[in-house]
Image (spheres, rainbow, N blue to C red):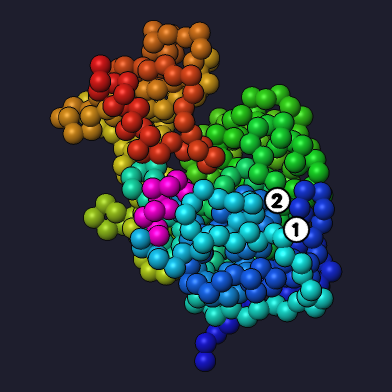
Amino acid sequence: MVDTLPLLPESGMDSIVAYRGITPVKRHEFLSDVQTISENIPETSHVLNLCKDRYWFTATLFASISRGILSILPNSVAPEIVSELTQELPDLVCLGDQSSISHDLPYLKICGFRSRISTPSVPQIPANRAIVQVYTSGSTGKPKSHAKTFDKIIMCVKTEAKRIWEVTNGPCTVLGTVPFQHMYGLESTIFLPLLGGGKLSSPLPFFPADIADSLATLPEPRLLVTTPFHLGKLVESGIKFPRIAMIVSATAPLSMELAKTAEERLAAPILEIYGSTETGQIATRRPTRSTLWKTYDGISLKQERGTSIASGGHLEEPQCLQDTLEIADESHFRLIGRNSDMVNVAGKRSSLAYLSQIITRVPGVRDGIFCIPEPDEAAARLAAFVVAPGLNSHDIHAALLEKLDPPFLPRPIIFLDFLPRDRNGKIQAATISELIARYILAR
């Protein structure tokens, strides 16, 4: 007999599970939306969820789960990406909350059906059912797909909820600045509130003023799910923010300096999450309290031939990590840097992420990133792209010499009006390659 799990954890049908803007959504209303959408999805095994509103994205996702349909969540819906998906999955159907889409695929607009369901049921889901297929971000190369099962997602979310709610003294209303189609946003702004006892919210704010306004519309206690990039902008803004119970950060290393400043400026503790698309979340730390990360329940670490391997817990199988770790014991480690990020210059080692943190701390530098223009060269040569109106290369080199050894100074430094980051604050590997080809190699 197949083990099953309820689509939502037990609670009263009149309990509030989400907010659409300022409007509360009760459990029975959400389940009614889920069931109505589920009944209208055409026969297929794969759907592409294009909803732009987090609430409708979630209702559509849970409707697909209840129907046993795999939700395909690529890192981009650019025409060439969708074209590749349709070749791989010829029965792919698009679901969305827009009136129309630009892709030449069967399309169903999901928010327009009149629900006639007065007493919705809670579907039972096979525990080992694959419910989403997510893709790596592309920040380190070509995106790869990974299927996630319902039981493993619940296991992961329960640990995340325990870690966070212990600090916030109970479940929170969750606001996220990160895309909900990608693994971090999916886990922390959708599954955490709905499967971990919190409350979901629909806004996806980007600018500091919008984030402050969105927080103000939500009831306390509030949890803010964000990135170091957004966190830096919040600190710089000077805006007064509503009370926040906790801030969760991921997608890139958070410097100790920014963590301390943000905790003071926003008057909220920060929890940093470590994970990847391949593994999901597997560890957390309070960066202002410790350099050590603590793994999630049941997950253990070991090293073989210089490679760090995580296993157990919600992982389907042992996973080789793409980062260099210093393992303290089976459940604690220090993060040294991304394997593909490590550089060796004149016998000295560092990471591109660390160097990028240093350059963005230079007064007058609004954004910056280090890169290796020609990684196959015998001697690595570093370069940097910066957004720094009013500064020149000499100014930046002089400031960097106070923090870095001379071999790590970037030559050249390319000045741009902006860096093309995505909503997670990342710059895709292909984008960096394009910048290098255009501004450095073509010189």
The 10 Å Cα crowd at callout 1, few under 14, some 14 to 19, many 20 or more, is many
Quarter the C terminus occupies = top left
Amino acid type of disc 1? Ala
Highlighted magenta segment, given as a residue range: 76-86
Amino acid type of disc 2? Ser
- Is residue 193 something one can see in this rendering? no
Does residue 7 appear to the left or right of 75 in the view shown? Answer: right
Name the N-terminal-most of marks 2 and 1. Answer: 1
User: Between marks 2 and 1, how big is the CA–CA gap?
Assistant: 8 Å
Q: Main secondary structure of the magenta part?
A: helix
Front position in the image: 351 or 226: 226
The 10 Å Cα crowd at callout 2, few under 14, some 14 to 19, many 20 or more, is many
Q: Which mark is residue 18?
A: 1
Q: Residue at x 33, y 31 (%)?
A: 434
Let me know if residue 229 is in the magenta part. no
Q: Which mark is residue 202?
A: 2
Secondary structure found at label 1: strand
Q: Residue at x 77, y 29 (%)?
A: 240
